[in-house]
Image (spheres, rainbow, N blue to C red):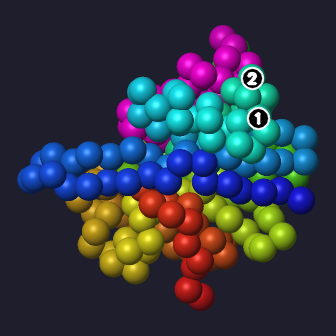
């Protein structure tokens, strides 16, 4: 069965108006055939990532896929660690310098798929993983943290496409038993 492990919990702390300290949540998806990283944090987090991967029995070269939920720097800063991986960013799939794309969803393997969830940016994607405990959706900044799941105003300050984000949030909430947000700990969805 598939397993989702938050390697490094993200955070977002307001310092003053228009200034925030932030890092995206970095998540490992252990599949039947593939190992997948979802988001890679800030530049400078290389050693933290290597240490967290090592605790799970992996090295960067063991990772088959890297999915960037969106292109913000605090979510893509360590992509270069994963030199052997296939990269998915937006609807683009890169194997080295060979690019292809998908329209609505892309199956990494049965039980692990990448779906379009625009809103925070037009290119947002989320990773849907079927696990023993239920369906986990690694949602990036479509959900900033658990508090934002039920406070429909908190996320809007960062949304470039609020109407699309509302639709994506509803889609994720209908699919997920658990959500890994862009800047916080995994949380259970209240049905």
Q: Is residue 148 above or below residue 69?
A: below
**Residue 172 appearing in the image:** no
In this rendered view, identify the residue nearer to me: 52 or 76: 52
Mark toward the viewer: 2 or 1: 1
Residue 128: x, y in percent? 69, 58
Please tell me in which quadrant of the rendered image residue 134 appears. Answer: bottom right
In this rendered view, identify the residue nearer to me: 112 or 5: 5
> Mark 2 to mark 1: distance in Å?
8 Å
Residue at image point 37% right, 71% down: 148
Q: Which mark is residue 61?
A: 2
Residue indicated by mark 1: 58
Residue 140: x, y in percent? 49, 52
Q: Is 75 left, or right, of 93 in this rendering?
A: left
Residue at image point 63% right, 62% down: 137
- Label 2 with label 1: CB-CB less than 8 Å: no
Residue at image point 54% right, 57% down: 139
- The image shows a total of numbered marks equal to 2
Residue at image point 76% right, 35% down: 58
Q: Secondary structure at mark 2?
A: helix
Residue 66: x, y in percent? 65, 34
Q: Is 10 left, or right, of 21 in this rendering?
A: right
The local crowd at label 2, few if under 14, some if 14 to 19, many if 20 or more residues have their Cα within 10 Å, is: few
Q: Quadrant of the N terminus?
A: bottom right
Q: Secondary structure at mark 1?
A: loop
The segment highlighted magenta reads: 70-97
Is 24 part of what is drawn in magenta? no
Q: Is residue 150 above or below residue 42?
A: below
Q: Is 19 left, or right, of 190 in this rendering?
A: left
Q: Quadrant of the C terminus?
A: bottom right
The local crowd at label 1, few if under 14, some if 14 to 19, many if 20 or more residues have their Cα within 10 Å, is: some
């Amino acid at each position: 069965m598939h397993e989702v492990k938050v390697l490094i919990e993200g955070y977002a702390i307001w310092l003053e108006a228009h200034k925030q300290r932030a890092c995206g949540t970095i998540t490992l998806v252990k599949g039947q055939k593939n190992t997948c990283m979802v988001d890679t944090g800030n530049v400078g987090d290389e050693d933290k990532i290597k240490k967290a991967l090592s605790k799970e029995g992996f090295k960067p070269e063991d990772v088959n896929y890297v999915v960037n939920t969106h292109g913000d720097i605090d979510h893509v800063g360590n992509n270069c660690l994963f030199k052997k991986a296939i990269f998915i960013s937006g609807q683009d799939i890169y194997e080295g310098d060979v690019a292809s794309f998908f329209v609505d969803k892309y199956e990494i393997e049965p039980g692990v798929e990448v779906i379009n969830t625009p809103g925070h940016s037009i290119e947002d994607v989320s990773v849907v993983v079927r696990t023993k405990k239920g369906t986990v959706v690694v949602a990036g900044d479509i959900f900033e943290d658990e508090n934002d799941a039920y406070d429909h105003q908190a996320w809007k300050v960062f949304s470039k496409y609020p109407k699309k984000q509302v639709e994506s949030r509803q889609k994720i909430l209908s699919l997920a038993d658990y959500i890994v947000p862009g800047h916080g700990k995994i949380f259970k969805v209240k049905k």
